[in-house]
Image: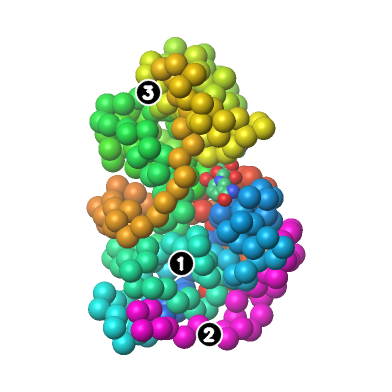
Amino acid sequence: MQAAVYTSYGAPDVVTVRDIPTPRPGEKDVLIRVHASTVNRTDCGFRSAEYFISRFWSGLFKPKRQVLGCEFAGVVDSVGSSVTMFKPGDKVFGFNDRTFGGHAEYICQPENSAMDIIPEHLNFEQAAALTEGSHYALNDIYAAHVKAGDHVLVYGATGAIGSAAVQILKYLNAHVTAVCGTAHVDLIKSLGADVVIDYMQQDYTQQGLTFDLVFDAVGKTSFGTCKPVLNEPGIYISTELGKNGQNVWYSIFNAFTGNKKVLFPLPVYDKEMISFIRKIADEKHFTPVLDKTYALKDIREAYAYVETGTKVGNVIIRCI
Ligand SMILES: NC(=O)c1ccc[n+]([C@@H]2O[C@H](COP(=O)([O-])OP(=O)(O)OC[C@H]3O[C@@H](n4cnc5c(N)ncnc54)[C@H](OP(=O)(O)O)[C@@H]3O)[C@@H](O)[C@H]2O)c1
């Protein structure tokens, strides 16, 4: 099968599309013909190993798993002898940031992994983009124990994480103030945000608004900048480590930051979370925002585009 393979860490050109053996499903595995995947920040992080710490999972000197792609959507091709949850022909989507493998024509997954049936109204591209952004958004929203009526600021609502966070928070009946650039104000309004602040025109800290949670989905703010707009108690979460890893340190020494706290939750993904994502997608509370689509053979261009930091929602890879 054709797959996008990387054998060393580095820039997008470490990835080459070539033939590798098609995986064979074990007794409890499902073989999926991948129709669509994404290139996202998780793939970029593991490919570049920009943060050395990622190598503790992916391999100290070179990648142990050579095909990235943590999101996939496709059709079940065959199943192992003891599989009961899926059958050939099922349209499925899923997430796997441990073994990856979505940037290929086929992927093999254990049946009990984070995988589910695609909601009927979604196509393969939309289904492929259901999980990565929502995964980070959900982990952080759960960690902050957001409840109905809470006021939440989503800073950087345009990315995969931010656009998922706005929709999930609205599903939870939070009051959402979203911050984005001028070009994306209408898009973010259409996702349901109650208030949209264009950071190119207005300063979100000077609007007389305060929040129970500030969720920086693009890692461009700091706890210090956001502290004045946090309620007491209030929580600050960023998707980035912050200068000198400060978000991690603050979260460890929370006892010293009073009633305004920084959390840095470690993301987890399981079948339960994917069922929740499927449910809110099925009920049309969550639709992933899609940007450009690339063929698998052009995956280097997709990586380069994602790394410009200007993607809107999700970048799709067609694998068929
Ligand atoms: N290392 C990892 O494994 C990993 C995994 C997942 C995510 N992350 C981090 O999570 C963050 C979000 O990733 P993502 O994929 O959701 O989104 P993304 O691709 O980083 O988001 C791009 C969007 O962010 C907005 N943006 C750029 N600069 C901004 C600024 N100064 N203020 C506000 N918005 C700005 C832009 O929209 P506008 O034009 O509307 O501003 C742009 O379209 C990234 O920092 C990423 O590194 C890391």
Mark 2 residue's CB less than 8 Å from ligand 1: no
Residue at mark 2: 22
Residue at mark 1: 72
Q: In the shown orientation, is residue 40 left or right of residue 230?
A: right
Q: Secondary structure at mark 3?
A: strand
Residue 2 lies in quadrant: bottom right
Residue at horizontal 50 percent and vertical 60 percent from the top: 97
Whole-percent x and y of residue 227? 50, 18
Residue at horizontal 62 percent and vertical 34 percent from the top: 245
Quadrant location, ligand no. 1: top right
Q: Is residue 142 visible?
A: yes
Q: Which residues are magenta?
A: 1-29
Tag 3: residue type?
Asp
Q: In the shown orientation, is residue 56 left or right of residue 254?
A: right
Residue at mark 3: 212
Is 168 in the magenta?
A: no
Whole-percent x and y of residue 162? 47, 41
- On the rendered image, what quadrant is the N terminus found in? bottom right
Residue at horizontal 41 percent and vertical 17 percent from the top: 259
Q: CA distance from mark 2 to mark 3?
A: 49 Å
Tag 2: residue type?
Thr
Q: Secondary structure at mark 2?
A: loop
Residue at horizontal 42 percent and vertical 39 percent from the top: 140
Whole-percent x and y of residue 208? 44, 12
Residue 30 lies in quadrant: bottom left
Mark 1 residue's CB less than 8 Å from ligand 1: no
Residue 211 lies in quadrant: top left
Whole-percent x and y of residue 240? 57, 39
Question: Quick one: label 2 or label 3, which is nearer the N terminus?
Answer: 2
Q: Nearer the viewer, mark 3 or mark 1?
A: 3
